[in-house]
Image (cartoon, helix red, strand yellow):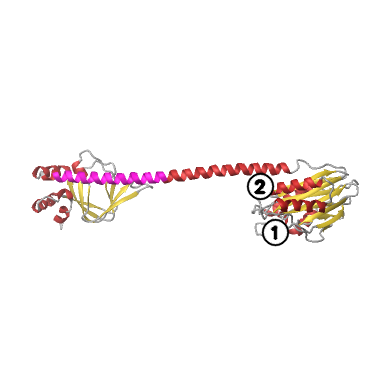
Amino acid sequence: MSVNLLSKIPLFADLPEKELDGILSSLDVRELADREILFHEGDPGDHFYIVMKGILEVLMAVGQTEEMLLNILREGEYLGEMSLIMPGGHRTASVRSRGEATLLSMSRAQFLELTSRHPELSISMVRVLSQRLDATNTQTFRDLSEKNRQLQTAFDELKEAQTQLIEKERLERELQVAADIQLSILPDELPQLPDFGFGARILPARQVGGDFYDVFLLKDDQVGVVIGDVADKGVPSALFMARAHALIMAEADIGLTAGEVLRVVNRHITRLQKSTQFVTVLYGILDLKTRVFNFARAGHEPPLLLHPDGSVDRLTHKPGMALGLWDAITLDEGSVTLPPGSTLLLFTDGMTDCRDPKGEPFGLDRIKTTLSDLLNVDAQKGCDYLLDTLMKYQDGSKQDDDVTLVTIQAIDKK
């Protein structure tokens, strides 16, 4: 059995069996305890070993956190043959026993003495070196090919990531431009009048939203007030919002009633619009002399009126239809007188639909309760208070829709 072990080693395969018996009898026996190190990576290499019993582990970075198992050697296998034929060489890895192990050991001096008796070992040595070189070249080529493949994959991924980054930056620039355009559409400041105060706040759910509002002076001591909510969000909605706002402003200047303005705007939108987008709108005209607010509602949330006694009413007559869906629409048209000390609140459905972390919507009743606390509060401060209350209720949960508020306060000068 021992002779067979030596005969299976390429370096000694051509030696006669009698010589192998002699070599075996001259080899030293090395006993290893469990997890004992035979040699460390970088040690001088001057012995050749044959595993007679047990298991050996070939390791890199032995004993360190990045320790790596390279190979397992079992009975009949060998290691360190290059140390016999390469003087001055160093071990390229560490070897440790896994359990107890028994090894046979041959020194370089023993090997050189053997080659003097058997010159044919030189031929075997050249063959072993050639095989090792071929194996090294093949492995090196495979390693280089794999590294090239990995580098190409990394390059392709980096190129794709760069493309995505460039596209992301482009979209962010476009979104910022759209957001700037949207903000430019909203009024920089609201009218300041002796008998009426106006307030407004908008909180987009995304960088670019679909809500809008405006408060603007008309002729004959009148003020136009509009609030709208485009279906969906993002850049397309912002563009649609800009178109709807521009059309309302254009028609409001020619002296039409609130209902007539929205019907004309709807005809323009349905003629020009090629998508399924639509917008809910509430447009009203406040007569500063009579204190009457005539409004038309196209599918939008009905306004809430805070009376001077602190009670709150919801102003609605019939549902009303959004703009942009049908050529002929039905509107909810009405009017309300704003006595001194009253406040009218216009809002989008993002206010009612906003949810707390448990998923419960803010709802209409909470809006009414909050509004009732704003008796004789400045119009803008009232908007700020309403939005702050909503955000506290939301408590960091996801905002799914834009929130827009507009208040009209009839000032009580008493």
Say which of 308 and 210 sits in front: 210
Using residue 252 as the reference point, say whether residue 14 is left or right of it: left
Q: Name the outermost residue toward the front.
A: 271
Secondary structure of the residue carrying numbered label 1: loop
Compute the Cα span from label 1 to label 2: 23 Å
Q: Residue 344, how many percent across, how many down?
A: 82, 52
For disc 2, the neighbor class at 10 Å (few under 14, some 14 to 19, many from 20) is many
Question: Which residue is more in the foreground, 404 or 216?
Answer: 216
Which numbered disc covers residue 361?
1
Q: Secondary structure at mark 2?
A: loop
Query: In which quadrant of the rendered view does residue 87 lie?
Result: top left
Say how many tags the image has: 2
Tell which residue pokes out farthest to the top in this image: 88
Q: Position of residue 68 (x, y in %)?
A: 34, 49
Residue 379 among magenta residues: no
Residue at numbered disc 2: 208
| Badge 1 density bin: few <14, some 14–19, many ≥20, Cα 10 Å | some
Q: Name the kind of residue labelled 2 in the image.
A: Val
Q: Is residue 364 in view?
A: yes
Q: Magenta region: which residues?
A: 123-152
Of the image marks 1 and 2, the number of the one nearer the N terminus? 2
Which label belongs to residue 331?
A: none
